[in-house]
Amino acid sequence: MRHALLSTAIILAAMAGVSCKNQWDLQPRDRISSDRILSSEDGARTWMANLYYQAPFEEFGFSGTAFHKGSANTVGFYQDQFTDNAINSQGNNIDVSHWWDYSFLRDVNYLLQQVENISGISDDQRKEIEAEGHFLRGFGYFALVKRYGGVPIIREFQEYTSDPEQLKVPRSTEKETWDFVLEEFDKAIAGLPSVRTGADSRRATRWLALAMKARAALFAASIAKYGARDGLDGEAVSLGLVHMSPSESNGYYLQCIAACEEIIQSGLFGLYKPEPATPKEAEKNLIELFSNPSVAPSENMFIYSYGDPEVVTCHSYEFWCNSNQTRLSAPHSGRMNPVLDLVDAYEYYAYPGRDGTIVTRVDGNVTDYDGFKASHEYLRFDTPSQIFEGKDARLHATCILPGTMFRDKLITIQAGYVARNGSATYEGSSNTSVTVGENTYYQYGAASPDDYSGFDQSQHFVMTRTGFSYKKFLSTKALTKNELGKNVNAYPIMRYAEILLTYAEAVFESGEGNPDLAKTCLNATRRRAGHTTEIPLTSENIQRERRVELAFENDRFWTLIRRREYQKVFNTGTRKALDPLLDLRVSPPKYIFVRKIVLKEVPHTWENKNYYLAIPGVASNGCIQNPQW
């Protein structure tokens, strides 16, 4: 839904007083009542636009800790930076986003209550609006249940009253809440149109409702199967407000499988350019897909787009995430630093079906993160990009790698150099230099900070500290301006690639469905990335493929949550960097690489209570609190 329309909706909604019933006999003359807005088709469209704006879409405006804050967030935090995919150039946070917005759900309930009173529309239009309301309500409760477990389910619009006790609704069990989410999506599936065109093309369709049902059902199934890994206990657990029986998992997997199969078998959707001739062609295709989602309507099942940046606030992903050398005027860019942990996950074409862990030493040791040692023999490369040759095309389409081109600029990411005497100078806060013969070499690869993109801690707010910068979803064209809140890149909320991988996971985890089709789905995204060797349907292969295909699409965080694997990743865990060093001990100089802990990273220990966040306002709403809060 375009922000130009959404912005208008917010103004009208504010005038309407959408959250409370007018208590006074004297009607104000400076606002429109809610029932009057919802008495006409135009009013209903305005109301719906406001609902889309309020809905918890995790798009570019989602900062990782709050919704619609991506434009104003002063440090450029995003959700993948709270995982083992990336880190912020300045901070080390591992955080979880809250969303307890019953005002949005109240507005949806009011729409559903008033839909019969909308004039000038046909019965079919009325059914569509009602189905869209159920989609948005399901979407909202999905956002709640994946954060809090079982929550109060309010099916009817509540009139405010002087007695707050009449408004209190106890928490439902986690199972009841997941079932409600899936029922809402079923109602949406039954009533939404299959196709939207023109101004309505960014609204929900029947196929999107099926896709969201598949996503939610996989989440519910994972919680049922793996929820006990969190080890939580207490009143909320004993009452079923959190956790579900493992015996419930296959029922949810079956719902997921059925939804995915309907989408797959429809023949309406497909991967963008699924059969590249070479990995280089695959890289080009993927960059097209990520930088301009509109080129792939058959893959991008739902796109969140933005309006005129000169009229409305859009997002700031370009502002925060560009490399230093391509940031233009943005003073605090370079905040999204992919980490070595993610880069290692991308396969080498020569070694399909296993992590492509980058080897930097002659002895093959990949577990030493203590920094450079002159006693070690390192592999040497003519250019810093050579070490990444043969890696999955998705790595090159997702991350800016040292010594590669982006927007016609050679991106220089260098941590330091090794002097002729074997001493190393790297990382730190000063760009030192050394002269060898007639040549002067700089620690960070160039004399001016404008000409390099990494490791200079005097410029920490624009420099990567991992050895990698961010590319996925950024425009491939040079920017003419880059201002806070003025970026308009579109964001894919749902891609067909996710449906394929969700189907593969649901079939493997449940033992139900079609395993041959599931294997085909697993290998389809790899083939689109230039792989020619099929890999078997295993949990390890599915999770690796999901991670690299959906990197920076807010999937990794929720996968670690639903599969209860955060404590495995962050049990006094640290994220890793790859430091390129120019080795001046040889002539001509060559590049070596050091695997190490990210500069200034601190060990993280995941607290299992964060699998279920604290219920807000329990003193007034009477809800039972989640474990350990």
Image: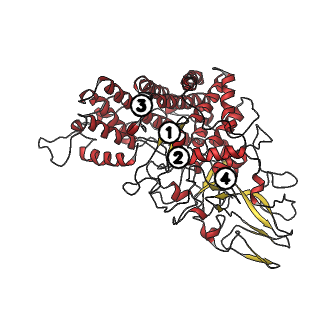
Q: Amino acid at mark 2?
A: Val
Which callout, 4 or 1, points to the residue nearer the camera?
4
Q: CA distance from mark 3 to mark 4?
A: 36 Å
Q: Amino acid at mark 4?
A: Val
Q: CA distance from mark 1 to mark 2?
A: 9 Å
Q: Which residue is mark 2?
A: 96
> Which quadrant would residue 33 be assigned to in this image?
top left
> Which quadrant would residue 565 be assigned to in this image?
top right
Badge 2 crowding class, 10 Å Cα cut-off, few under 14, some 14 to 19, many 20 or more, is some
> Observer-nearest residue: 201 or 70?
201
Q: Position of residue 407 (x, y in %)?
A: 61, 59
Q: What is the secondary structure assignment of the residue under circle 3?
A: helix
Q: Which residue is mark 1?
A: 147
Q: Left or right: 264 with respect to 603?
A: left
Q: CA distance from mark 4 to mark 1?
A: 26 Å
| Residue 173 visible to an observer of this rendering | no
Q: Left or right: 176 with respect to 411?
A: left
Badge 3 crowding class, 10 Å Cα cut-off, few under 14, some 14 to 19, many 20 or more, is many
Q: CA distance from mark 3 to mark 1?
A: 19 Å
Q: Which residue is mark 4?
A: 339
Q: Position of residue 144 (x, y in %)?
A: 46, 37
